[in-house]
Amino acid sequence: MEIRIEKTTHPKEKPDQKNLGFGKYMTDHMFMVDWHKDEGWSNARIVPYAPLELDPACVVLHYAQETFEGLKAYRTAEGKIQLFRPEMNAKRMQRSNERLCMPTLPVEDFVQAVKALVKVEEDWVPSEPDTSLYIRPYMFSTEASLGVHMAAAYTFIIICCPVGAYYPTGLDPVKILVEDELVRAVKGGTGFTKCGGNYAGSILGQVKAEKLGYTQVLWLDGEERKYVEEVGTMNIMFKIAGEIYTAPIDNGTVLAGVTRDSMITLLRDWGYTVHEEKLAVDTLMKAGHDGTLEEVFGTGTAAVISPVGELRYKDDEVVIGDFKTGELTQKLYDTLTGIQWGRIEDTYGWTVTI
Ligand SMILES: *Cc1c(COP(=O)(O)O)cnc(C)c1O
């Protein structure tokens, strides 16, 4: 793929690296490439970051034909910039797009585009401890037409923003509410994809949880509302009597997280038994009461790992590990972030230097 580069003549002032937050400050440039049914992919370009012009009848605005990804670029102590398993994001986006009847960008083009944009924005990759450059590829139908069908035109874009330490004061356990009424995904649906529509449908659950003082929702399966699946933006794992349990991804309802896959690899290498199988919420709560539920943690690119200190399901409540971060949770966090920021040798070939 040939990428045309047009640099901005008005670079922005960079934000204070100590107060980046998440998703607030966009960088100077964006990557774009168009797809048309007669021409395929064309006009790959890196251009100054600017608002988009869209026809009000544009398909995405009516039928939410949109997919996205999320990954990060990390600056090592020596000043190198590296990505973490970007080809996994590229492949996952292809699976999302196939489900939503959208064209797929070849894996090597996806990775090339990410690398090229990060290279142009290298001064935006922050260096303060635990900061990184968050990269958001996304794609949507741009055709102006109100008919429901596969569109003739799409645009793929990548934007980036420097993001701060997720836990400025160290890992901080969260309280999670098990949602027993609303569902996020059903078999045959779009649960395994990263599409905007999944999120639109989940905000009500999030609002309910926040009103009751919980940080996130734990979704149950859409058919029986009996088995634990995942948290809003994270996969979730449970350590019960020394073994690890997490929902399977072959059902089509749970997102195949890059962090999930990396944690499972580390855990198995450390000798843990990892069960990728259905776990009933009743079994989970029972383990919480009889003392065998040792640790619970969410996994995802944004936070890497999010310890869970409390779970509520209907009128039942369990506190996990005295609301403190578990030993294994901490070890997983230290190891994975160690590899990502280049503090620990990457023996898995996960990191890609830019
Ligand atoms: C992105 C996402 C995750 C985490 O995936 P990672 O690749 O680890 O960042 C988990 N669940 C949902 C619903 C997601 O959208």
Image (cartoon, rainbow, N blue to C red):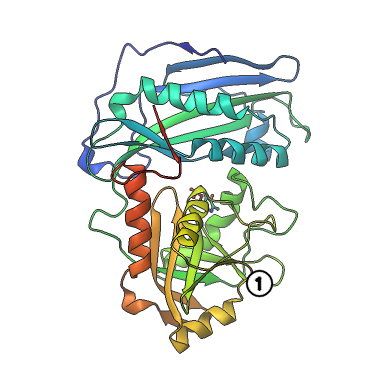
- For mark 1, give the secondary structure: loop
Residue 7: quadrant of the picture = top left
Give 140 or 271, whichever is nearer the viewer.
271
In the rendering, at what x and y percent does residue 189 appear?
72, 53
In the rendering, at what x and y percent does residue 317 appear?
45, 82
Quadrant location of the N terminus? top right
Quadrant location of the C terminus? top left
Residue 352: quadrant of the picture = top left
Give 79 or 29, whichever is nearer the viewer.
79
Left or right: 55, with 317 as reference point:
right
Left or right: 270, with 249 as reference point:
left
Query: The residue under label 1 is which amino acid type?
Result: Arg
In the rendering, at what x and y percent does residue 154 appear?
65, 25
Give 218 or 325, whichever is nearer the viewer.
325
Q: Is residue 273 above or below residue 262?
A: below
Q: Residue at x 62, y 31 (%)?
A: 140
Left or right: 283, with 272 as reference point:
right
Residue 233 shows up from this direction = no
Judge: label 1 CB < 8 Å from ligand 1: no
Left or right: 89, with 61 as reference point:
left
In the rendering, at what x and y percent does residue 52 appear?
51, 23
Q: Is residue 206 above or below residue 345?
A: below
Residue tagged 1: 225
Q: Residue at x 47, y 58 (%)?
A: 269
Q: Residue at x 65, y 41 (%)?
A: 96
